[in-house]
Amino acid sequence: MATWSAPGKVFLFGEHAVVYGKPGIAMAIKPRVFVTVRKSKRPARAKSPYIDGCFEAMGVVGSVYINSQIPSSSGLGSSAAVTVATLSAINDEFALNKSREDIANMAFEIEKTVQKGRASPTDTTVSTYGGIVLITGSSRRRLPPQNMHLVIGDSLVSHSTAKMVEQVAELKKTNPGIVDPILDAIEGVGLAAIHHLSNPKELGRYMNMNHALLEAMGVGHPQLSRLVLASRSAGAFGAKITGAGGGGCMVALCAKPVRHRVAQAIQSCDARAIVTGLDTEGARKEKNV
Ligand code: PMV
């Protein structure tokens, strides 16, 4: 029996633009998914295409138990975390000697297959390695870790990443003169932000700019706007949509003493708040329970 965990993620900058080869900056966060795999003659009956994909890719049969702290379908990367933790646990239980890089690549391929081609390597990279990652096209670079105090607001409004990506693609096709400069501006914000990762006040300003640009592309939602404004009023340095938008989550960057005030402000808007921070570890082996 082997138990591994992997973290969820938030996009700090560049969601949607990353689909067009612009830089995306994402970071691993504290809620994790825990997966236990055991050798078994009977195949896993997880009813998840991600888990099936993991056993298929590794060419083994086993049973699986999942315990997730990450809300699913909220844009916090739960499917990538499940995939990375399952591959890591299978690798350990069956002594397959795959490297971390192999796991990241396999997880990306599985996500891509299940999501019918619509996946960037962001979630699987961040979940495998942890830390803050800069994604540009097919290149992935880890940025220096920072001690950030984040509050995530889950709007509890369901959304579809595939639908939002398609919506932006359609708008780009019909209005390239508007959308292309917005994507360029998102790139500009992300590139500027890289130089201020250790300065939360400055970083917050860039997050606000990125939020406005996402709204301009039509991926906002009234409830996300409410949570963003409530967080800023409660003292956050900055707040923005994180992930595909149209529902799902927003993220606020705060000074440590105000994070619970920001969380309360989010909760008073009928949303769920998660106070969190950077997870530098990525996939990790856990004690079996
Ligand atoms: O909602 P999420 O966390 O799956 O993020 C989607 C991010 C996009 O840039 C919109 C799509 C992608 O695959 O990068």
Image: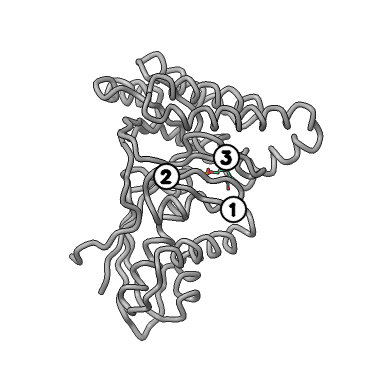
Residue 171 location (% of width, % of height):
75, 34
Horizontal placement of 188 versus 50: left or right?
right
- Taking the view exactly as shown, the residue that stands out farthest to the top is 233
Q: Who's the residue at 27% across and 66% down the image?
A: 3
Q: Is residue 241 left or right of residue 3?
A: right
Q: Look at mark 2 in the image and give the residue it sits on.
A: 9
| Residue named by callout 3 | 23
Residue at the location (46% across, 18% down)?
A: 229
The x, y position of residue 199, in whole percent, is 38, 24
Which circle, 1 or 2, is nearer the viewer? 1
Pointer 3 or 1: first along the chain: 3
Assign ligand 1 to one image quadrant: top right
Three-letter amino acid code of the residue under disc 3: Pro
> In the figure, residue 115 lies in which quadrant?
bottom right
The residue depicted at 33 percent of the width and 79 percent of the height is: 95
Q: Is mark 2 within 8 Å of ligand 1?
A: yes
Q: In this view, does 198 lie above or below 7?
A: above
Q: Which mark is first along the chain, 2 or 1?
A: 2
Instruction: Give the residue pinned by disc 1.
Output: 138
Q: How far apart are marks 1 and 2 (CA)?
A: 19 Å
Of circles 2 and 3, which is in front? 3
Q: Where is residue 206 in the image (x, y as percent from the top left)?
A: 50, 23
Residue 111: which quarter of the image? bottom right
Give the residue at the far bottom of this rendering.
41
Vertical placement of residue 206 versus 154, above or below: above
Amino acid beneath label 1: Ser
Q: Residues within 10 Å of mark 1 (few under 14, many from 20)?
A: few
For the C terminus, the quadrant is bottom left
